[in-house]
Amino acid sequence: MSKIHLMKPELSNLIAAGEVIERPSSVVKELVENSIDAHAKNIYVGILSAGRGKILVKDDGDGMDKEDARNCFLRHASSKIKTEFDLTRIKTMGFRGEAIPSIASVSKVTLTTSDGNGAGTKVESEPDKELVLSPAPSRKGTIFEVRDLFFNTPARLKYLKSDKVETYSIVEQVEHLALGFPEISFSLAIDGREVLHTTGRGDLLEAILKIYGNRIADSLYEVKHEGLYFSFRGFVSKPELSYSKKYNMLLYLNNRSIYDYPINKSIEEAYRDYLPPLRYPFSLIKLDIDPALVDVNVHPSKKEVRISLEGEMASILKNTIVETLKAKRPLYDLSHDAKGQNDLGMDAFDVEDLKEEEGKKIEEGKEDFDKKEDKIVYFQDSLPSTPSYVNPHPVEKKEFVLEPKKTSVSQDGKKDFSNIFSEESYTLRLPEMHPIGQVLKTYIVCDGPDGFYLIDQHAANERINFEKTERLFSQVRSRVVPLLPMTVELSFKEQENLDEEHLSRLLSCSIVVEKFGERTLIVREIPSFLSDPDYSAVILDCVHAVLNDEKADPLKEMRLAIANIACKKSIRANETLTMVEMESLIQDLAKCVNPANCPHGRPTLIKLSRSDVEKLFRRTGF
């Protein structure tokens, strides 16, 4: 007797519902995506009792005639794909034809629809019962009403979260859809109260403003790229706006909200110099790519996809964000608006917005900050700007490098740690400021045209030494023999990759290796600045990374070691500095590529404006 038989449609729909319909927000997602595919310009979502009681989705899209209204409840019935070729070029949000029959198998559904040609159609559906069709008004569009969700699957109903959690999940789902399609007007009502409404004017920044508010919308930089096979545009936050979770790193592929680890990781890497560990920026990136280069049919909810050219896309996105941050050069400013404060109570202004006067010398005795009318730029582009940092009292140059002998360089005298910056023509990247003293033996106080600055002497010197060491390594690849023998055990893949190409790449890292038995390498030479035995793990990690074809350049593979070296060389807290030393430190900081943050992402300086101080003393604005 045969043991294998076909399932009843009702049973197969219940199984499909277990994959597609996880919670009330899944129902909202599927129905709203159908409205989007129907070319709707206005979509209304109404929720009662966190979606358990009722979900209503109403649109002004194409609508359906009587036959389509009946067929949409059939499993794998779809108007979006007809051939195998269509599956390789999916341009719609849905395509499988599973959503509506899956929803109908675990709830009571009423569909009212019309294509505008004649009378409309009303379809009433309950699990294990025949569809009931009746005439309806001829209003063009579709209304889906879903009631008593999961009433026939008690286990699924029992394990739903609290009303508050399920409601938030629905709100988040609609927000993500609204950001994916800013040209569509979305309205969301929870228990009769409207909580979200977008205009549908197609302005992505306006949609961000409607959903996240002024604070985030005012703290964004635009990024974009146009390429042959793909393009992207979107917004990333200024470094002062950061979070402890990755929830606000939003990624869209052809308007579909997705998660892609390599691309998200590239955004994190772009902020490595600007944020401390375990802090993440706000980002919203919309990728446009030929549908033929994407496979969206790999996940039940289509949240994960497979993308061709993923590595190239991630690399270009990272470089674009890095260049944007370098161009804007955000510095930290104590917020003068409580609404703009983040966890650290700080806000930022952009040095790019300051009119830098490179090389300008300010004559002695002409600086009277009380009489100046210039104002520091915050976010508004229309405000006046200040010149870059220029020392009005030239002082003798003094380098802040403790124990410089620890940094080995070539012995030909062509390069030296102390003159790395002096050999280059650097743009001064700090606003005008002049040191007036030191507090707590840790922070340098600087006067400015419209406020004052606090500089963390250790963090500032750490940034200076980091960039000097990084540049030294990139320019002077001197090598030494390690003090202690270093051997590397190889995996099968690493043995196979031990060829001239990989040995050359190791040599570019100033690492020379030789075979030492069947599965072992011995390291003969290493970079001179990593000669300390404490950095042997860095050398071994670099060897493994190269032989495993990990995509990272030598500087990035050794970045942590460089940052640790810079930290050890730097001025410590509780160390008294002379005025000459303070001036010299600020001069070197002004020459750094990123003067605003130490290598670990902490701020090096913070600005307190005149208005901040006046508010603290209750002189104004309290």
Image (spheres, rainbow, N blue to C red):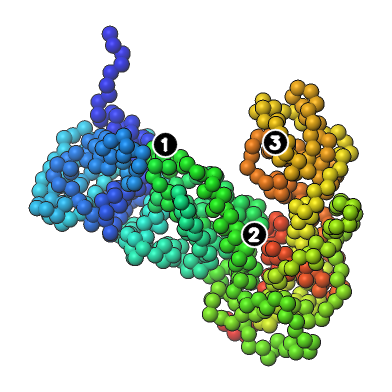
- Judged by depth in the image, the label closer to the viewer, 2 or 3, is 3
Asked if residue 288 lies left or right of residue 125, the reply is right
> Quarter-wise, where is residue 599 in the image?
bottom right
Asked if residue 188 lies left or right of residue 374, the reply is left
Residue matched to label 1: 298
What is the distance, in whole Å, between disc 1 and disc 3 at their CAs?
35 Å
Check the picture and name the quadrant holding the N terminus: top left
Callout 2, which amino acid? Tyr
Q: Which mark is residue 502?
A: 3
Q: In this view, does 32 lie above or below 450?
A: above
Identify the residue at image location x=64%, y=54%.
272
Q: Which of 424 and 250 is in front in this view?
A: 424
Give the residue furthest to the bottom. Answer: 371
Residue matched to label 2: 274
Question: Which tag, 1 or 2, sits closer to the chain's start?
Answer: 2
Asked if residue 310 lies left or right of residue 533, the reply is left
